Image (cartoon, rainbow, N blue to C red):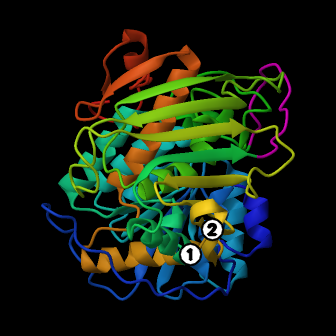
Amino acid sequence: MDLNRITRRDAIGAAGVALSAMAAAEPAAGQDAAPAATSDRFVVGVIGPGGMGTFHLKTLIANPQVDIAYVCDPDSTRAATAAKTVESAGRPAPKIVGDMRQVLDDKAVEAVWVATPDHWHGPAAILAADAGKHVYVEKPCCHNIREGRLMIEAARRNKRVMQVGTQSRSTAHVRKAMEVLSSGAIGEILSAKVWNSQRRRNIGHVEPTAAPANLDFDTWTGPAPLRPYQTNLLHANWRWFHNFGCGDMGNDGVHNLDIGVWGLGVTTHPSAAAALGGKYAFDDDQQFPDTQCVVFEYSEGDRVSGKYRVGQKKQLIFEQRIWAPYKQEGYENGNAFYGTKGCLIMGHTVGWTLYGERNTVVDQGTGTPDLPAHHQNFFECIRSGAKPHADIEIGHLSATLTHLGNIATRLRKTLEFDPQKERITNDEAADALVRREYREHWGTPQGA
């Protein structure tokens, strides 16, 4: 997500923004509810308080029901800056730590925010749930498909709430658009398109060097395989490297892929993914595509909702051009839903337009991302034991799309995927990438 754009719109809730009241979600069907909170206040820790973590921190500071006990980052400068942000708002100084285990070992901490680089999302969330913490984990929720399944299992066995940071799930204008789609306003939706069309930058080519004194690079690397530090790796640029990130498909694209799944009405994985793409624009150290087109096919129907026939197919298309100086169909990051009676075009950070036959404008909505509402939904579910708007099982569906898309693009293959076993069935090399290589480390998930 473009944090600068959101900052200008004040959508991420700087200090002083009032929290939106959101109705609690329904408990998860067929599973035990998480135990409800017993206190009127929440003691939390923020793991990774830089980048998106800063927006979370400011939103938490503005929430009078929250006490921020810890800020945790292996970069001591970032951690100190985060603590100063808390103090400057008139709040008690949080403890500054570089090792998340210190946060997880404190029984007073009820919930943690995991806003680390992608490679730590799954391991940190699993450790936190096993330590009895409720978890808000940034998107994509996992670095690979297997981690996502392990996160679901950790949340369920510990009866913890695990909310994924796709805040559109709690944003009023997006929720309204999904209601419009589910009401049948555009008929039966057989196809949807997602695009990530914006301008990133060339990060150049650099040689490895020693990490700066303020950075514990070994702790930052965690369970990922070790590789030398280089100056264009962090902060932020780690997302362009296979060991640590998921490319822009997992960075910005996952927001709209999540909405695409939601609007299509599917509640399972696709059965196939085909892709082409690569580095068409940037000559630099980035390892992920700057240009990408992925097509997903859902071939077994939605057995839960019964909205379309078992055996009928649906299609989800993802397009990415992160060198583009223009907006596609009015939105840098968007969704289009194509139905038998019309279509709906959306930019989740701006609004949506519903078109009927012959492009007649039927309805419209506007709005900006509502991070405070997403936080509030998380807290309400901790209190009630209900299932959050972006439950880990929902986040896993969207993250799997990014992983399948990146694997298919990397190998230039059409992949057949078993939604139940979560395995690629037609290519051994591709199936090996459903998991990842870890080094021997305390953060490596069991069963990964």
Q: Are marks 1 and 2 in contact (CB under 8 Å)?
A: yes
Is residue 200 shown above or below 113? above
Label 2 sits on what residue type?
A: Trp
Q: Which mark is residue 199?
A: none
Is residue 122 shown above or below 391? above
Residue corresponding to mark 2: 352
Whole-percent x and y of residue 195? Answer: 65, 45
Residue corresponding to mark 1: 173
Which mark is in front, 1 or 2?
Answer: 2
Q: Indicate yes or no whether the magenta region holds residue 334.
A: no
What residue is shown at x 53% (from left), y 77% (from top)?
A: 172
Q: Quadrant of the C terminus?
A: top left
Q: Quadrant of residue 294?
A: top right
Q: Quadrant of residue 394?
A: bottom left
Whole-percent x and y of residue 252? Answer: 63, 48
Kindly give the residue lying farthest to the front in the view shown: 358
Q: Indicate yes or no whether the magenta region holds residue 201.
A: yes
Q: Secondary structure at mark 2?
A: strand
Q: Which residues are magenta?
A: 198-213
Is residue 432 shown above or below 132? above
